[in-house]
Image (cartoon, grey):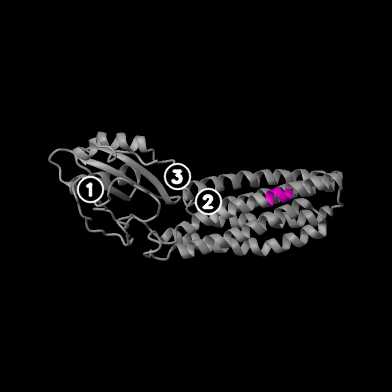
Amino acid sequence: MPNLSHEAHDHDHPHRNGSDGDGDHDHAHHTHAGHSHAGHSHAGHSHASGVTDQRRIGIAFVLIAVFMVIEIVGGLLSGSLALLADAGHMVSDAAALAFSWIAIHYGKRPATLQLTYGYKRLEVLAAFVNGCALFVIAGWIVIEAIRRFAEPVPIVGTTMLIVAFAGLLANIAAFMVLHGGNRENLNMRGAWLHVLGDMLGSAAAIVAAVVILLTGWMPIDPLLSIFVAVIILKSAWGIVKSSAHILLEGTPDSLNPTEIKADLEATVTQVRSVHHIHAWSITGERHMITLHAVPAPGVSTRDAMVAVQQRLATRFNVEHATIQIEDAACEAQSPCNERDE
């Protein structure tokens, strides 16, 4: 294998020990001396959306936090589990929005030698914690609903209806604030789903209050509370699954290594073959790839690397790729061509 040096970098991520940053991508039996980021630029990464998302989340937090207190008081005064369930969800939402705001704020800090991709993963961690918190809230709602079936509690329908309607208006306002944010951002999507769940919870409380006022049938309150809990669990599962996949450095849904290999070998004439492809994510919208490539006969190392990186950027929207160049002799050998497990 030729001993190639790094090309000039035009991004600002510091490197240690020849590693490209984030982690435990162990390519045993070979060296990364030949990898390069030639032609790579972060110019396309705009931080404007992050600032906008942070502002949106801050406004939504104020709306949710203020009404959360009103709904807790209203739930206690009316005796409505549906209101308390929605208030409990709003407590989780307020904490989630605060955590999301902090994660975006710290995520803008520059990379360091210890954190070569900066603090961006805080956004994913925040989404994971928020999703787990929703499971706890939903569990409490179901347990309390079952208890209410066995021991019905008198409910003041008028108070319940007024508070639930006001809560719906507050949630609609927060939902509209968040709706224009970056939906590709997992943290922003989690905040949006939290508020959507609140809207449905307030709507369920309104329905329960109307039924109680018209018919006096109290079981509607815990029944609709369980309905809200199911909605919360569905949202929680999606957030936890997506964030855990990123934290485990799973392959993004939009990047199939088999498809990437076939595409590069078919369209990039500067390389003869590619292999040892790894794809993972730093955040929900920022993906990374490492791979080995064997240049076509007569093609320079730099030309092969630049061609592969350009194709990855245009076809797969991956702007940060680490390419290790190998010669034909190394390609035919094991362990040079051995895939990491």
Q: Which residue is mark 2?
A: 189
Q: Measured from the top left, where is residue 42 in percent x and y? A: 32, 57
- Give, as a three-letter code, the residue at label 2: Arg
- Give, as a three-letter code, the residue at label 3: Gly
Stretch in magenta: 137-141
Q: At 69% across and 46% down in the image, what residue appears?
A: 229
Does the CB distance between marks 2 and 3 fall below 8 Å? no
The disc, 3 or 1, on the residue closer to the chain's N-terminal end is 3
Q: Which residue is mark 3?
A: 250
Q: At 57% across and 55% down in the image, what residue appears?
A: 129
Q: Residues within 10 Å of mark 2 (few under 14, many from 20)?
A: some
- Could you tell whether 324 is left or right of 69 in the image? left
213 magenta-colored: no
- Give, as a three-letter code, the residue at label 1: Val
Residue in front for this viewpoint, 105 or 305: 305
Front position among marks 3 and 1? 3
Spatial separation of the CA atoms under disc 1 and disc 2: 34 Å
